[in-house]
């Protein structure tokens, strides 16, 4: 074997120094990458370790060869490096493939998690879904009342109180109603533990059952208690911590008389107060929150509508003893329909409604909420008392859901789920729902069933028809509905109508038809909405002549100003 000369010695020493420098450089790179990335891939770690092993083996081999002056040791070292390199390539490939599989699994798990987060319902949605179950049960109580099986004082008010108690996790709840022809609030239902928020008589024994009985049958004239103050102001009153509050009396030191946290809700229909609901929590429980106040306000709006409708229906039923059921249903339908459509800034709304005796199929309304205005037109299948029940359900659920921030597709979806399969009668309805936003000058139209909307486009100078053929509501909870957003500029005219308009027959058996309706709208688009309605009404009267009609007729004309 060739011996190492002086020049070779210097070369090997230089090789050892370079390998040592390489070792130091790799250690520095590894430390820097770990500090920046926080984690180093396994193939890179293996590469680093292998390179360190290469450098170490070569350095030792070179040093030994210089010391022993023999190339054999260096050759052995290089052979070992070759073996280590082969092992590195094999192991590195295996680790790389494992890491790729793990990365794909992790990426898929992250994507699934993100998708799951995106599909989670909003807080507003969860709140509305929670309230919808309460709405359904209240509607079932109303259904029983209309059928003459339940008494409102023994069924409706206690259930409303129980709904407030459960939804707000309260310790006590009370519902009071305004007495007809009297400026008096009377307690209609009291459940749970509720310290009286009014001054108890001095001679009343401070025993829990005596106090409860006094509260249960209490009546308050205006100005006599905190209940009447809430009714007169028409605003929610939230007392988070009742300790030392001047609005509440000191009725004694007994524990059951101590107030913790209270919320008072006026029960209002439009601007008319029909009652007051209140909830209480004991001092040793967590006070009510602002979020619970909002839930209670949603529930109070719905409860007020139910109380008002049920009382009106009850009153109509009482006067129907000498009339047949058809006349009673007609009264119920008139109660449900607005006496005067609410004025909407930026819009003129005219209506034509003709009630066919014994049918009771059409319902319409204008619902004004804080951010949006909703215009609804429904054609309920069936007739008589059954269709009246469905109308009540539709109206009540719409007033609840439109008070949220949900879009029209969610509103119609919840309305469908709210009435599908909830009562033991065949029921479904075609419905048109318009959402109007004045700031954007747009309307959002969504329909269920064979509902259509006509629009006179003033800019294009033509009639446009928008029709969505979908399942009616009440058929299948899995039905889906899609909305259409349409600009509505000054001079544009939108028309919503039930099939009683276009399917009406004359004596010759001819249908009035959508084409004739569209021509009348086009010919009179420059007139105001009420004049357009009158033109169509007079034309229909002339077309029908003395022919018998068999369906309600409803037309809404909406003109942008």
Image: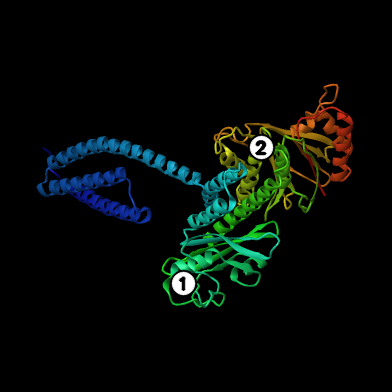
The first of marks 1 and 2 along the sequence is 1
Query: Quick one: quadrant of the N terminus?
Result: top left
Q: Residues within 10 Å of mark 2 (few under 14, many from 20)?
A: many
Q: Label 1's element?
A: helix
Image location (x, y in percent) of residue 92? 28, 38
- Residue at the front extreme? 322
Q: Which residue is mark 2?
A: 387
The residue lying toward the viewer, choosing from 534 and 77, is 534
Q: Residues within 10 Å of mark 1 (few under 14, many from 20)?
A: many
- Up-down relation of residue 66 to residue 241 (above or below): above
Residue 363 visible in image: no
Image location (x, y in percent) of residue 502? 79, 30
Q: Which residue is mark 1?
A: 257
Residue drawn at point x = 47 percent, y = 46 percent: 117
Image location (x, y in percent) of residue 486? 73, 41
Specify whether 501 is left or right of 404. Answer: right
Whether pointer 1 and pointer 2 mark residues with C-beta atoms closer than 8 Å, the reply is no
Residue drawn at point x = 44 percent, y = 68 percent: 208
Residue drawn at point x = 16 percent, y = 45 percent: 61
Label at residue 50: none
The residue lying toward the viewer, choosing from 506 and 40, is 506
Image location (x, y in percent) of residue 264? 57, 64
The residue lying toward the viewer, choosing from 5 and 60, is 60
């Amino acid at each position: 074997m060739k011996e190492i000369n002086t020049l070779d010695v210097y070369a090997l020493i230089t090789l050892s120094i370079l390998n040592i420098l390489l070792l130091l450089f790799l250690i520095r790179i590894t430390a820097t990458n770990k500090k920046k990335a926080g984690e180093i891939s396994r193939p890179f770690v293996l590469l680093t370790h292998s390179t360190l092993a290469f450098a170490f083996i070569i350095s030792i081999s070179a040093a030994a060869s210089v010391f022993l002056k023999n190339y054999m040791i260096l050759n052995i070292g290089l052979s070992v490096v070759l073996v280590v390199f082969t092992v590195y390539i094999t192991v590195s490939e295996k680790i790389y493939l494992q890491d790729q599989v793990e990365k794909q699994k992790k990426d898929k798990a992250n994507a699934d998690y993100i998708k799951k987060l995106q599909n989670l319902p909003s807080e507003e949605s969860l709140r509305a879904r929670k309230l919808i179950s309460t709405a359904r049960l209240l509607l079932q109580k109303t259904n029983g009342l209309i059928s003459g099986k339940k008494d409102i004082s023994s069924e409706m008010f206690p259930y409303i109180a129980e709904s407030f108690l459960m939804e707000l996790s309260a310790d006590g709840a009370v519902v009071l109603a305004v007495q007809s022809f009297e400026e008096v609030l009377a307690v209609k239902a009291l459940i749970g533990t509720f310290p009286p928020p009014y001054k108890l008589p001095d001679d009343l024994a401070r025993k829990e059952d005596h106090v409860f009985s006094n509260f249960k049958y209490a009546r308050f004239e205006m100005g006599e208690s905190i209940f009447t103050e809430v009714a007169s102001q028409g605003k929610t009153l939230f007392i988070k911590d009742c300790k030392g509050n001047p609005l509440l009396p000191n009725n004694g030191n007994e524990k059951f008389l101590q107030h913790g946290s209270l919320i008072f809700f006026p029960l209002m229909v439009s601007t008319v107060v029909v009652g007051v609901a209140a909830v209480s929590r004991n001092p040793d429980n967590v006070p009510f929150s602002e979020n619970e106040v909002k839930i209670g306000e949603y529930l109070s709006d719905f409860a007020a509508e139910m109380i008002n409708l049920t009382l009106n229906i009850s009153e109509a039923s009482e006067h129907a003893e000498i009339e047949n059921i058809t006349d009673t249903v007609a009264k119920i339908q008139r109660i449900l329909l607005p006496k005067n459509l609410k004025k909407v800034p930026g819009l003129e709304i005219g209506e034509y409604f003709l009630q066919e005796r014994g049918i009771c199929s059409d319902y319409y309304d204008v619902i004004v909420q804080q951010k949006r205005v909703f215009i609804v037109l429904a054609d309920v299948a069936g007739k008589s008392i059954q269709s009246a029940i469905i109308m009540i359900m539709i109206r009540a659920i719409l007033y609840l859901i439109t008070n949220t921030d949900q879009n029209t597709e969610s509103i119609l979806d919840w309305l469908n789920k709210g009435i599908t399969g909830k009562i033991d009668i065949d029921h479904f309805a075609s419905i048109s729902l318009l959402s109007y936003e004045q700031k954007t000058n747009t309307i959002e139209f969504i329909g269920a069933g064979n509902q259509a909307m006509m629009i006179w486009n003033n800019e294009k100078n033509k009639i446009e028809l928008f029709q969505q053929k979908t399942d009616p509501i009440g058929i299948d909870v899995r039905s889906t509905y899609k909305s259409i957003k349409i600009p509505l500029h000054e001079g544009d005219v939108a028309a919503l109508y039930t099939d009683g308009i276009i399917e009406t027959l004359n004596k010759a058996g001819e249908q009035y038809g959508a084409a004739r309706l569209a021509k009348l709208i086009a010919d009179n688009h420059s007139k105001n909405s009420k004049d357009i309605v009158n033109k169509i009404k007079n034309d229909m009267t002339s077309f029908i002549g003395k022919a018998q009609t068999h369906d309600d007729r409803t037309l809404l004309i909406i003109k942008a100003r």
